[in-house]
Image: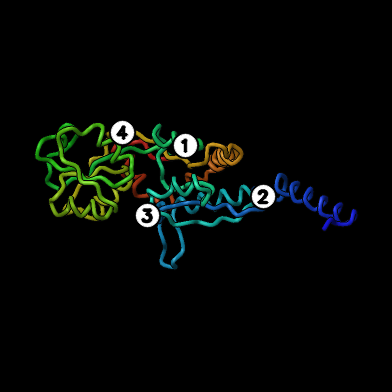
Amino acid sequence: MSLPTAARWFVLASLIALSACIFSACGSRDTNTLVVGMDLSYPPFETIGPSGKPEGISVDIAEALGKFLGQPVRIENIPFTGLIPSLKTDKIDCIISSMTDTPERRASIAFSDPYLSTGLALLVARESPIQSQQDLDQTGKTLAVRQGTTGEVWARTNIKNAAMLSLEKESSAVLEVIQGRADAFLYDQMSVWKNAQEHPSKTRAVLQPLQKENWAVGLRHDDTQLRDHINHFFKSFRAQGGFDSLGDKYLRDQKTAFQEQGIPFYF
């Protein structure tokens, strides 16, 4: 049965209006929630606080970004190895989870401008003679790494003689060093320093970086608008002292320790 002419015009007008909504303000980032993926197991950057809510440096960055964009923010807690698949399948809008910008990851996703520079360092036993890559890369030595991290990628390329222990959790890798089953744990400088402070009688930090890295926000390749907005946000946030404030709030002791050793700080 055919529709009356007036009804046909109403349906056509409704479809045109819907199309206009999809391609204009109705689909803009000004009104939609920004969904940010994080692995909330990496304090002080991404963790779950005593209240049961996400907190940490990356959470503060995400919330500041949401205010800059005029959007509410929802954080999705996703295991680190699941962050890129979640981004590529549109379950999240971006990744703010202490993720290093690497050529391998760029094959799958895009990145914003970097917001933090760090390096890979070693957590070793308190009395260990290990001071360098050469000391570690010996037959009979064992290196612990965390699965899916740049530490694991770097080690598989650069460690030829030592055995490798790939673990899901940071705490498990630290325990391997404490209990003597691993000679070192390769991870970022900040975490290595933190773990050495938490276990001073059992471990020490070798902080001179084996590799320097940049952290950035992960994005879909075609989401150039959001990438431009985030890069603009970072410039503004840095100029207003936002990163300095985060360093003082969460990493004051690390800043002092790194300055004493002549190692550049992160932000």
Q: In the rendering, at what x and y percent does residue 166 appear?
A: 24, 46
Q: In the rendering, at what x and y percent does residue 171 appear?
A: 26, 55
> Can residue 159 be seen at all in this image of the molecule?
yes
Q: CA distance from mark 4 to mark 1?
A: 16 Å
Mark whose residue sits in front, 2 or 3:
2
Secondary structure found at label 1: loop
| Crowding at mark 1 (Cα within 10 Å: few <14, some 14-19, many 20+) | some
Tell me the residue that label 2 is attached to: 30
Residue located farthest toward the left when viewing the structure as drawn = 140
Of callouts 2 and 1, which one flags the residue occurring earlier in the amino acid sequence? 2
Which quadrant would the C terminus be assigned to in this image?
top left
Q: Is residue 247 left or right of residue 238?
A: left
Tell whether label 1 touches label 2 (CB within 8 Å).
Answer: no
Secondary structure found at label 4: strand
Residue type, label 1: Pro
- Seen at 56% across and 55% down, the residue is 73
Residue type, label 4: Gln
Q: CA distance from mark 2 to mark 3?
A: 30 Å
Tell whether label 2 touches label 4 (CB within 8 Å).
Answer: no
| Crowding at mark 3 (Cα within 10 Å: few <14, some 14-19, many 20+) | some
Q: How many marks?
A: 4
Of callouts 4 and 2, which one flags the residue occurring earlier in the amino acid sequence? 2
Q: Which mark is residue 211?
A: 4
- Quarter where residue 101 is shown: top left
Tell me the residue that label 1 is attached to: 114
Mark whose residue sits in front, 4 or 2:
2
Secondary structure found at label 2: loop
Secondary structure found at label 3: loop
Q: In the rendering, at what x and y percent does residue 226 appear?
A: 59, 41
Q: In the rendering, at what x and y percent does residue 117 appear?
A: 40, 37
| Crowding at mark 4 (Cα within 10 Å: few <14, some 14-19, many 20+) | few
Which quadrant would the N terminus be assigned to in this image?
bottom right
